[in-house]
Amino acid sequence: MPLVSMRQLLDEAAKGGYGVGAFNVNNMEQIQAIMEAARETQSPVIIQASRGARAYSQDKYLFHLMLAASELYPEIPLVMHLDHGNSVETCKSAIDLGFTSVMMDGSLQADGKTPATFDQNVEVTRQVVELAHQKGVTVEGEIGVLGGVEDGHGAGGSGHVTDPAQAVEFVAKTGVDALAIAIGTSHGAYKFSSKPDGSVLKMDVLIEIHKRLPGVHLVMHGSSSVPKDLQDVINQYGGKLKPTWGVPVEEIQLGIRNGVRKINVDTDSRLAITGAIRKVFIESPEKFDPRDYLKPAREAMKKVVAQRMTQFGQAGHASDYAPISVEEMKKRYAAAAAAAAK
Ligand SMILES: [Zn+2]
């Protein structure tokens, strides 16, 4: 199966009332872990790469690994998505390479740090939508500012919660397919210093945005759950993680009941991999074949990804629909634009 349009995956998820995990990758083992989890749970899936990942692995390696995944797992609808594009040029280079979906994060300026104005965000996102839809590629935008920093991207601090009225205006002016909103989550492992409640996680804002934009697919960033058992493995084998809390799965599930269709998860995979590698290093210090620790690392990531796929509800939905090509999406976007112009 060729790489598929994210728009279709999210439309189907909306029909079925479930969410789809978007898992970050930098290398072959992470892609393998996600694909094995998708096969085991029969899940459609989004694999995403940040600018940092593209620089680390090089575009060509990454893209060909993704093509290999789509050939080896023909029964799994698979999207290749750019996470946090910082400029029109970055999004264009991903589209040219063959990504079937891009995020234009215009909430920050091109430096990936300084918050942008609303008008700057609209302008840059609108340009990416125009360019991407001409090629049948999906676009995710962002309104509000997420907390924390990941891969050198982020404003730091606790961010800025999305204003529902601005979200409505943003969607109308840009035509994005999916919308990332800030509701108090942040990137990285250190999201909350205690179990988050309503005072930090603004689920009421999310519910209000969904009420005003029922047809828009919402995206939750920074949504690793940072489970204690994964932290414990790392610390048990010589790691030094400080106590930390992520986004509870129940809150994500509440989000899914209120329009959240894409859930970004990176930290949980990182924790699973690091714990498994540390365990081998401490228990079998005589080993030096990378396969001796990369295999359990891959297995540990597969386990947490499969668990999320089940919790988000995408499990069992891989063969619900025939995937549409980006070529077909191109025609649909053109027809929708023509209808809107009348
Ligand atoms: Zn993010």
Image (spheres, helix red, strand yellow):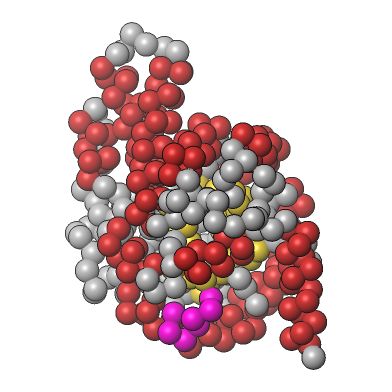
Q: Residue at x 22, y 41 (%)?
A: 229
Q: Is residue 291 visible?
A: yes
Q: Nearer the viewer, residue 304 or 84?
A: 304
Q: Residue at x 80, y 82 (%)?
A: 338
Range covered by the magenta-colored residues: 210-216
Q: Quadrant of residue 197?
A: bottom left
The reply to whether the magenta stretch includes residue 47 is no
Residue 305, given in percent of the width and then of the height, sits at: 40, 44
Q: Quadrant of residue 158?
A: bottom left
Toward the top, the furthest residue is 286
Image height check: is 89 above or below 69?
below
Quadrant for the N terminus in the image: top right
Q: Is residue 277 left or right of residue 128?
A: left
Toward the bottom, the furthest residue is 342
Quadrant for the C terminus in the image: bottom right
Residue 277, given in percent of the width and then of the height, sits at: 36, 26
Image height check: is 155 above or below 51?
below
